[in-house]
Amino acid sequence: MKLGRCPICHSDLHLDALIEDEAGREVLAMLLKFTHSCARPLVAYLGLFRPAKSNLSNSRTAKLMREVLDQFKPSRHLAHALSETVRQIQKKRAGSGDVKPLSNHNYLKTVYDSTSNLFLYSEAGGEAAPVKEGNEVYFEQMYRAGADFSKIQVAGAQEWLANRRQKNDG
């Protein structure tokens, strides 16, 4: 079944070809597990593992996704760490011209650990630790942490900031 055309290379995208491959099915199924807007930054992050002159196989992509799921719980914190990792690696590559693919998740782990102070909610360590993940709570935490709201890519962030400023002024 032809889905359409790739917006980048304009080749045909076929869903039946993707799901015919077991690893392709696994990749699609795992993408659904990445909630909290993690899927898009995850795909960009996986691109950092791609060798310059070839593509990642579906089996390698599935393996990398499993490793991320094993190490991190999908959350806004993970989405932020994935985005920051991609941004920092791309910036480093642009400056040096070095496009050596990543070989492990150590850089992501470092970024994740170093940004934990921006995410004040506790990640559930069991039933006793509820996770606060509503947008209102997230925006409040980012505001208190001094985040630049112009860079927050979550729907409603600008409106929340305007309302917050209005309450403070009034």
Image (cartoon, helix red, strand yellow):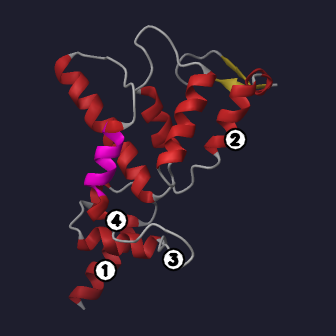
> Which mark is first along the chain, 4 or 2?
2
Considering the whole magenta stretch, tell me its main secondary structure.
helix
Q: Quadrant of residue 144?
A: bottom left
Pointer 2 with pointer 1, Cβ within 8 A = no
Residue matched to label 1: 164
Q: Is residue 32 above or below residue 28?
A: below
Q: What residue do we see at 25% from left, 92% from top?
A: 170
> What span is in magenta?
107-115
> Which mark is first along the chain, 3 or 4?
4
**What kind of element bears circle 1?**
helix
Residue matched to label 3: 130
Residue 143 location, x and y as percent? 27, 71
The amino acid marked with disc number 3 is: Pro
Q: Residues within 10 Å of mark 4 (few under 14, many from 20)?
A: some
* Residue 54 showing in the rendered view: yes
**What kind of element bears circle 3?**
loop
- Front: mark 2 or 3: 3
- Front: mark 2 or 1: 2
Q: Name the side, left or right, on which 166 lies relative to 19.
A: left
Residue 119 numbered mark, or none: 4
Alpha carbon distance from label 2 to label 4? 27 Å
The amino acid marked with disc number 1 is: Arg
Q: What residue do we see at 44% from left, 58% from top?
A: 76
Alpha carbon distance from label 3 to label 1? 25 Å
Q: Residues within 10 Å of mark 1 (few under 14, many from 20)?
A: some
Q: Name the side, left or right, on which 21 lies relative to 120.
A: right
- Front: mark 3 or 1: 3
Q: Name the side, left or right, on which 151 lies relative to 17.
A: left
The amino acid marked with disc number 4 is: Phe
The amino acid marked with disc number 2 is: Ala
Residue matched to label 2: 29
